[in-house]
Image (cartoon, rainbow, N blue to C red):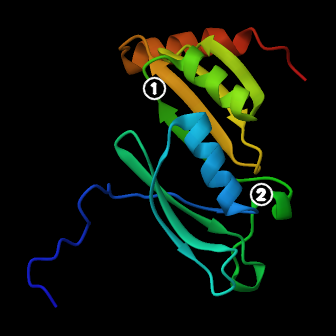
Amino acid sequence: MAQNVKAIPEGFHTITPHMSVRGAGRAIDFYKKAFGAEEVTRMMGPDGRTVMHAELKIGDSRFFLGDEMPGMGCQSPETLKGTTQGMFLYVQDVDAAFKRALDAGATVKMPVADMFWGDRYGKLTDPFGHEWSMGTHKEDLTNEEIEKRGKAFFEQIPKK
C-alpha cells in the first residue's frame, strides 16, 4: 500500500452526499441535463442493470448515488414516500439554472425569489423524489440584518 495516500481523496470535501434512487441510470442522465453534472465513475451491479455506485461532479463538488437496494437498507424517496434531506446548489444565475432543471423534468417546490438572507433562491423536486435548493448569493449581510429581515418576512406569513 502506498505511504502517501491522502485520508480525503483529491477533489473531495469533508462531506460527500450519497443518494439512493430508483433508476440510477435515468437519474444520472437527468442530473447531467438538469444541473450540468459530470459523470466521474459508474460501477454496475452483478446483474449488469443496476448501478451499485456512481460518482458525479457539479462544479467543484461531488456526490455519490446508486440504485436503491431495500434489502441492504438503501431506499429511495419514492419507496419512503418522501425525503428527509435536500441538496443545495450555489450557481451563477439561479433563474437560468432553475429553468434548465424544470425543462429537464424537475417540478417547482418553491419559485425563485429574493430571500431575506441575501440569496435569490428557489426549490425544486427531481423526478426521483430528491429536493434541490438553488441559489445565487446577492448580498453579504450581518447576522443581525438577516435576523431583522427574517422576522419581518415571517410576520407577513399568515398564521394557521
Q: Which residue corresponds to the image point at 86% horizontal and 56% vertical from the top-left?
A: 81
Please tell me in which quadrant of the rendered image residue 101 appears.
top right
User: Residue at the left extreme?
Assistant: 3
Could you classify mark 2 by the number of other residues whose Cα lies within 10 Å: few (under 14), some (14-19), or many (20 or more)? Answer: some
User: Residue at the front extreme?
Assistant: 48
Q: Which residue corresponds to the image point at 83% horizontal and 62% vertical from the top-left?
A: 80
The numbered mark, 1 or 2, whose residue comes first in the sequence reads 2
- Residue 156 lies, in percent from the top left, at 75, 8
Label 1 SS: loop
- Residue 62 lies, in percent from the top left, at 42, 52
User: Which label number is shown at residue 91?
Assistant: 1
Residue holding disc 2: 77
* Residue type at tag 2: Pro
Q: Is residue 15 found left or right of 2 in the rendered image? A: right
* Residue type at tag 1: Val
Does 58 appear above or below 22?
A: above
